[in-house]
Image (cartoon, rainbow, N blue to C red):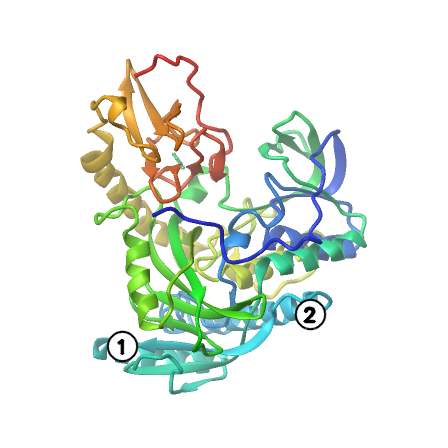
Amino acid sequence: MRSTAALWRRPAELETRPALSSDLVADVAIVGGGITGLTCAVFLAEAGKRVVLLEGRQLGAGVTGRTTAHLTEAVDIRYHRLESTLGDEAARLVRAASRQAIETIASLSSKVECGFQRINGYLFTEHERQMSELDAELLAAERAGAQVSRSQVPLPFSVRAGICFEDQAQIEPLSYVLALSQRLRKTSAQIFEATPVLDVDGSSGAFRVSTERGHTVTADWVVMATHAYFGKLAVQLKLAQYRSYALAGPATATHAGLFWDMDDPYHYVRRAFVDAQPFVIVGGADHRTGVVPEDGADAPYRELEGYAARLGMKPTLRWSAQVVESADGLPLIGPIEQDGRLLIATGYGGNGMTFGTVAARLLADAVLGSNNPYASLFRPRRAHVLASATAVVSENAETAAHLVAGHLKPVSHAPLSELAPGDGRVVQHGKEKLAVYRDDAGELHRVSATCTHQGCQVAFNAVERSWDCPCHGSRFDVDGAVLNGPATQPLATVTDSSAT
Ligand code: FES
């Protein structure tokens, strides 16, 4: 089963921006045209900064255009866990930051019809064993300042218990991209699409941002709004990347609301309207990027189809997206070095729209020299995330071990004539390993199987028809182009057509 496009339609008014065609100088270079980059550009350009934003594909074409766009204070990390690991004040700040993000999105989306709707959110369980955790979360969320209470859960199947977060929201992400883009039209910000960034060099004073076609942007500050930060290995050790899946289909009986169960991996549900027709979106079934599920590549979709059936929904669309989680469950936002001018924002988990907006405000404040109440909590060099990195390191080691056992050693020696259309495999060619894919027309696409980030071996993702790296989550299309960082360089092409 292949993935399709996400439910969201690209608004016709969202005009294409040109590619960078000359060298430029700016106060701030922003790398990435998703929610974080665009929102940060709005804040900085409206404050009078000269902003250049560089997007590798199209605005919103990355994770922003594939999110299910829950705008919520009910964070994935959970308030009771935050209280026990980082303390009550951290939980209070995360709640306040999430609320502020919802209100910021409400304000920035007010001039364009973005499907912004205030609705309640329900955290629920179907299992007695999760009751104590649900109760703990209710009390901790209350202490953090959320308007939350025990509640019935308006789903078409019965649940054990639930709590309701009042006044949450949802939005259509690509319409919101349009709203931000139109707002930026009224500023001096320069926005470029189809301009992949290959390198950021700050070794000689101002930063030099190099792009694929050779043009550069020289800037005093750089904001890396790329979802997955490319660069220092030390940062990668605090992060893990996951694929998260979603299904959507028309539904007759739908309820307004955001719904999250407490399973691991969890399921989430929301409603959306397409041409005034109600659709239900079901998401979840996450797994580590680059690790093929034991039950097959399409197992996550099959699992979600079972869940969708309980909601009376027959899926017509299916897609997946990349989720970046940090070692301690909070995003990494701020200067990568103490008081530095290279700013990063990553590790949003499943709260990308809100944490992306929090990041945009925080990074803009860093550039503008303004105080931000969340800067200390989310700083990338915080002590707690450094300590927690051991968990991610050990998970990475587990992944590597799994790969050695299941994917690395047994490169295929079967003849490529047996490779079916739509399938891919890693094969040995002399001393090299090649990633070989056969397209629907029967043509073979050969690229190096060595990830250009740190040299791990990629694995074929049959539902996305992509090459995914298990080490830090980079993804590449069948011709080697980068789909998700931290890699910035494509997989090497193989010109020898006789290879294998
Ligand atoms: Fe780091 Fe592939 S993503 S080695």
- State yes or no: discs 1 and 2 in contact (Cβ < 8 Å): no
Instruction: Note whether 344 is above or below 122 in the view shown.
Output: above
Horizontal relation, residue 309 to residue 213: left or right: left
Where is 226 relative to 123, above or below? above
Q: Which residue is mark 1?
A: 126
Q: Secondary structure at mark 1?
A: loop
* Residue 416 placement: quadrant: top left
Q: Residue at x 29, y 30 (%)?
A: 425
Image: 19 above or below 175: above
Query: Where is residue 135 drawn, in percent x and y?
Result: 32, 82
**Which residue was labeled with disc 2?**
107
Task: Count neighbours of disc 2 (C-alpha within 10 A) and say few if under 14, some if 14 to 19, many if 20 or more.
Answer: few
In this view, the residue in front, 101 or 283, is 283
State how far apart marks 1 and 2 are (Cα).
Answer: 36 Å
Question: In which quadrant of the rendered view does residue 81 lie?
Answer: bottom left
- Percent coordinates x, y for residue 316 in the rendering: 42, 58
In the displayed structure, would residue 341 be above or below residue 159? Answer: above
- Residue 149 lies, in percent from the top left, at 42, 86
Amino acid type, callout 2: Ser
Front in this rendered view, residue 80 or 185: 185
Quadrant of ligand 1: it is top left
Looking at numbered disc 1 in the image, what kind of residue is underneath it? Glu
Residue 53 as seen in the image, left or right of residue 72: right
Q: Earlier in the sequence, mark 1 or mark 2?
A: 2
